[in-house]
Image: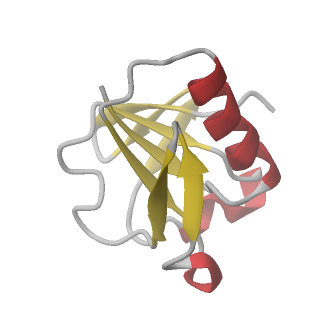
């Protein structure tokens, strides 16, 4: 499964990455998204590394699942991506995403 993690360098995002690895989630491709401060930063994942990138148009193309690990007030910073929350479900650009509960 091709997975994107938005907010990958934050507290919740770091925990999300740890859980994906610990529970052997079937990740075939991982894309880590973070702020411009973290762009280019390498994160350890499943015995390898993944490089952080910033959100931009088309960044979710080809992904099967996107998890959003941001505080509510920061969700507006998704650079053009639309987040519609419905309890623990959200839609990012018409694709189902997973958002943490409040």
Picture coordinates of residue 39, whole percent (x, y):
52, 79
- Image point 55% across, 67% down: which residue? 42
Image height check: is 37 above or below 21? below
| For residue 10, side relative to residue 20 (left or right) | right
14 or 80, which is in the foreground?
Answer: 14
Image height check: is 37 above or below 74? below
12 or 41, which is in the foreground?
Answer: 41
Image height check: is 23 above or below 79? above
- Image point 56% across, 74% down: which residue? 41
Picture coordinates of residue 51, whole percent (x, y):
45, 66
Which quadrant, please, contains the C terminus? top right
| For residue 102, side relative to residue 84 (left or right) | right
Picture coordinates of residue 50, whole percent (x, y):
45, 57
- Image point 69% across, 52% down: which residue? 70
Which quadrant, please, contains the N terminus? top left
| For residue 19, side relative to residue 67 (left or right) | right
| For residue 40, side relative to residue 35 (left or right) | left
Q: Spot the residue most to the bottom.
A: 37
88 or 51, which is in the foreground?
Answer: 51
Picture coordinates of residue 43, whole percent (x, y):
58, 59
Q: Is residue 5 visible?
A: yes
Color theme of the render: secondary structure
- Image point 38% across, 28% down: which residue? 27
Total numbered badges shown on the rendered structure: 0
Q: Is residue 87 visible?
A: no
Q: Spot the residue most to the front.
A: 47
């Amino acid at each position: 499964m091709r997975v994107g993690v938005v907010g990958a360098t934050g507290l919740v995002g770091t925990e999300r990455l740890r859980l994906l690895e610990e529970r052997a989630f079937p990740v075939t491709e991982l894309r880590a998204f973070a702020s411009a401060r973290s762009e280019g930063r390498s994160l350890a994942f499943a015995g390898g590394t993944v490089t952080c990138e910033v959100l931009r148009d088309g960044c979710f193309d080809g992904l099967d699942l996107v998890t959003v690990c941001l505080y509510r007030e920061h969700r507006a910073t998704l650079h053009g991506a639309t987040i519609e929350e419905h309890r623990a479900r959200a839609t990012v650009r018409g694709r189902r995403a997973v958002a943490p509960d409040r």
